Amino acid sequence: QIPAILFIHDTLGSSSAYMTCTSQALVTSSLQERFIHWSGFRTGLGNIWQPVYLAAAIIGALISSTGTGTFGKAAGVTPAEAFFGGFLAILGSRIASGCTSGHGLSGIALLS
């Protein structure tokens, strides 16, 4: 947390990375005028590091799960259910202007 706060003036979290990725892929110039909130996720250092952080977390999880032989072996949950549940968790965190991982990584570390 300390390097993130010192160098990019932000705390670690990942749900904003989804906003950055979708704004790059889906937001046209006409939509930027209508939805000003999304245009704020298109440029800037704060919007560059989060997709890199998210990609590294996904790659790390993939390496860990394949190395231990646990990839795709979640008990009681199909891959489609896991994907849909993750999508709903991210959607809910963005609607509430929060972050699912940000609380665990940042909120607890900052005692907030």
Image (spheres, grey):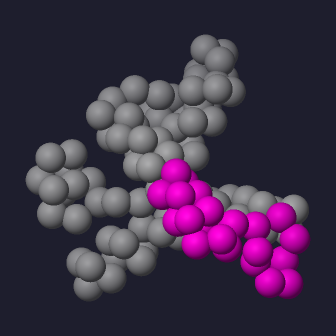
Name the one closer to the observer, 35 or 19.
19
Residue shown at 38%/35% (left/top)? 48
Residue 60 colored magenta?
yes
Q: In this view, does 105 lie to the left or right of 1?
A: right
Q: Count numbered badges in the picture.
A: 0
Q: Where is residue 75 in the image (x, y as percent from the top left)?
A: 80, 84
Residue shown at 65%/18% (left/top)? 28
Look at the picture and state if 48 lies above or below 87.
Answer: above
Name the one closer to the observer, 1 or 97.
1
Residue 108 colored magenta?
no
Q: Where is residue 9 in the image (x, y as percent from the top left)?
A: 20, 50
Residue shown at 62%/62% (left/top)? 66
Residue at the limit of the structure toward the top, as seen here: 29
Asked whether the viewer can see residue 56, the reply is yes
Which image quadrant for residue 11? bottom left
Residue shown at 42%/74% (left/top)? 103
Q: Magenta residues?
A: 58-79
Quadrant housing the N terminus? bottom left
Which image quadrant for residue 107? bottom left
Q: Position of residue 29 (x, y in %)?
A: 61, 14
